[in-house]
Image (tube, helix red, strand yellow):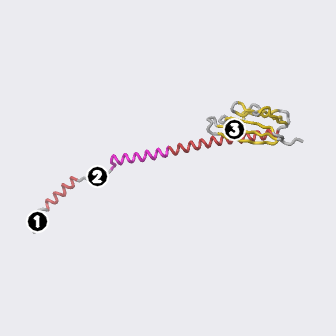
């Protein structure tokens, strides 16, 4: 049997080829790294902006809740005092004077930016009253007011009428 003279040459070429073509190192290229960082930063920025928008929305909702809670308290206090009153007078449009059955008087008035009853504040510190009007009707009293947050961004207006109690 004759030996093929190319056989050793093939083996030699295989060795050289193996040396020239080294396998790729596992890992990321610079382009892949930059792309990964860009996607990560974009995702983080999106999540941060979403969280900030959510926090602002919650704060706005809490401001509205505070306005409504104060308005409810004002209306309940007004209604209670009018129902308890023996005589009611409106000396000017921003003052209501109520004489109770024990002959004590309660005056509801605007003092600065706060509503007071007999000198005591009815509204909280984080709410201001920008306008209040009392109107004496035949057997009732109407009150209109506007509440606002200290920064003036949120407002709430209400009008209520309360009937005097029947005195026999």
Lower sequence index among marks 3 and 1: 1
Kindly indicate whether the residue at mark 2 contacts the one at mark 3 (C-beta within 8 angstroms).
Answer: no
Residue that mark 2 sits on: 24
**Residue 133 drawn in magenta:** no
- The x, y position of residue 47, in whole percent, is 49, 46
Q: Which residues are magenta?
A: 27-48
Mark sitting on residue 3: 1
Q: Does the magenta stretch mainly form a helix, a strand or a loop?
A: helix
Assign a secondary structure to mark 1. loop
Sequence-earlier tag: 2 or 1: 1
Q: Which residue is mark 3?
A: 146
Structural distance between the alpha carbons of marks 3 and 1: 110 Å
The structure residue drawn at horizontal position 55% and vertical position 45%, both measured from the top left corner, is 54
Looking at the image, which residue sits at the far left?
2
Q: Position of residue 168 (x, y in %)?
A: 90, 42
Q: Is residue 121 left or right of residue 104?
A: left
The reply to whether discs 2 and 1 touch (Cβ–Cβ < 8 Å) is no
């Amino acid at each position: 049997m004759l030996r093929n003279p190319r056989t050793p040459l093939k083996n030699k070429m295989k060795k050289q080829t193996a040396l020239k073509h080294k396998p790729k190192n596992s890992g990321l290229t610079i382009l892949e790294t930059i792309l990964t960082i860009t996607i990560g930063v974009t995702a983080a920025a999106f999540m941060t902006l979403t969280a900030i928008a959510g926090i602002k929305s919650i704060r706005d909702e809490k401001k509205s809740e505070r306005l409504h809670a104060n308005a409810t308290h004002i209306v309940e206090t007004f209604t209670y005092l009018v129902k308890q009153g023996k005589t009611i007078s409106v000396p000017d449009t921003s003052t209501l004077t109520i004489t109770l059955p024990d002959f004590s008087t309660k005056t509801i008035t605007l003092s600065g930016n706060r509503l007071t009853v007999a000198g005591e504040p009815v509204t909280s510190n984080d709410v201001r009253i920008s306008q209040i009007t009392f109107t004496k009707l035949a057997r009732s009293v109407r009150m209109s007011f506007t509440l606002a947050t200290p920064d003036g961004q949120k407002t709430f207006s209400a009008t209520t009428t309360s009937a005097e109690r029947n005195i026999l």
